[in-house]
Image: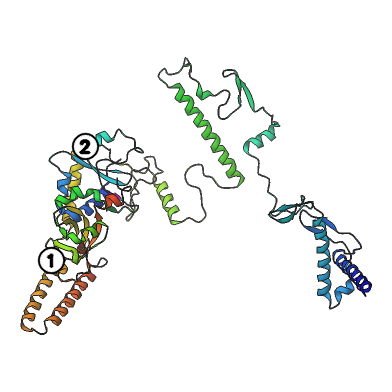
Amino acid sequence: MASCSVEDVLTKAERDEAEKLKGITVNKELDLEFDPGNLLAFDKNRIDTREFKDNKREDFLRSLARDNTQLLINEVWKLPTERVEEIIVAKLPDPTTSLPREKPAPKPKPPTKWEQFAKLKGIQKKKKTNLVWDEVHKEWRRRWGYKRAKDDTKEWLIEVPENADPSEDQFAKRNKAKKERVAKNEYNRLKNIARAQKIKVPGMGLAPTPRQSKAELAQAVNVAKISTASVGKFQDNLPKEKTPKNTGKKRKFQPLIGDFSSEKQKQLDLLKVMDSKKPRLDITKAVNKQMREEDRDSAQKSKKGFGKKGRRGNMSGKGKGKAGGKGKAKKGKGQKPHMKQGKR
Amino acid sequence: MRPLTDEETKTMFEKLSKYIGENIKLLIDRPDGTYCFRLHNDRVYYMSEKILKLATNISRDKLVSVGTCFGKFTKTQKFRLHITALDFLAPYAKFKVWVKPGSEQSFLYGNHIMKSGLGRITENTAQYQGVVVYSMADVPLGFGVAAKTTQECRKVDPMSIVVFHQADIGEYIRSEDTLT
């Protein structure tokens, strides 16, 4: 009995093992090609068209997918593993299949003016060393840039040439020349870019635009106006046109310590103008007068009607509230200019 | 630092005249020296010309404050009056409000004044008129805006607000870092 059961157990174990292996092992005519870096598997086996045509198409596809995925996972298990936070992780190698481009290839840039000229003349680019020996500082320094070998602008002594004005600042002259060279270089660089991208750059003034906005038209009008010999000083305005004041110029303020008396006078004049513009207190006086009258009325009525005093008092209060409210409502948005007085 | 432009001067004078009316003349034209307004970092400072000349020796980024700050211009060029102007505006105030000792504390904490806390109010105060708030001992406590006219104040119920709080001397402690 025991032996039977032992035999049974053994055969059962064997059968289980076989089944497990069956699950893992997959038989294919041709081996798959693997790219574990991309987790990719190529299956070049022929597909049985009969199985595909049957109604069991879904099952066929599912079993095919399962088999191929099993082979891929087997391949992944063959890779070296490491443990990351109690999870076994496989280290993927570099991908072997090259993926196609995501974006189109960049177009070659059109050659710059110098490049065109160099091609024409057959000038080759000469490779130059980065560092140059500086005799003055007795060390290797860059050819150009920060702390370069022969820096013109950092000389402490400049001889004044014979034909130059003795009161001319030679240092400033050198600095200005450098600035001009830098500006010219930058200008040429931008022109190259504009030519490459086919952007229209005007020689002077505004760039031509196909559809101009209101602001651009206004700007064009202003530029046209000042494009005269006297910079637009004698150009008349159109009937309803206003002269633009200080377009794009810095604001100018009065000097910090100017003429104190004139400043005082200007402020006093401003005050006088403000006073004259202020209307006299019509509204509040009128409202107050009205309220006083109503007070008097209510007081008289309360003397007569002893019992109804409270109610009258309330009514008069409400009446005043309403009158006041009406008065206030009128002080709303710009009904009449002098009414704005109350809402300070 | 720079002097105020015409628009800025106008905005500022309008605000000041709400509190002191025509007495601004006395601030501009003083018998005891020439005083002027200058703008620095959007704040308006009132100083004598002596102090101004001394302040020109300090660079702009290192200068914190000159004279007394009257207020500042907000981003949209509105003028906001600060409590530091109280000493100059209190003696020239046209409309005053006295507050009872009980609700003095409440006003100094930044609350509005209710009818129950109102001690006295000058006659003929218009609505939304700028007022200077005093304690019963005639100590200036701050600025406010009258929510009701004097007449209305008499009739309204004790729990309604009569003066809106604008600035009080408690701000010297509350907003110590923002006052200059």
Q: Position of residue A256 (x, y in %)?
A: 27, 38
**Towards the viewer: A100 or A184:** A100
The residue that label 2 is drawn on is: B49
Kindly identify which chain the residue marked by label 2 belongs to. B
* B27 lies above or below A8: above
A249 in magenta: no
Q: Is residue A127 above or below residue A33?
A: above
Look at the magenta stretch and give its main secondary structure.
strand
Q: Residues within 10 Å of mark 1 (few under 14, many from 20)?
A: some
**Type of colouring:** rainbow
The amino acid pointed to by label 1 is Lys
Q: Quadrant of the N terminus of chain A?
A: bottom right
Instruction: Tell me which residue sits at (64%, 26%) in the image.
Output: A131
Tell me which segment is drawn in magenta. Answer: B66-72
Q: How many labels does the image show?
A: 2
Kind of element beneath mark 1: helix
Q: Residue furthest front?
A: A2
Rendering coords of residue A233 (x, y %): 34, 43
Q: Marks 1 and 2, Cα distance to the nearest angstrom?
A: 42 Å
Please state which of residues A92 and B93 is positioned toward the viewer in this rendering.
Answer: A92
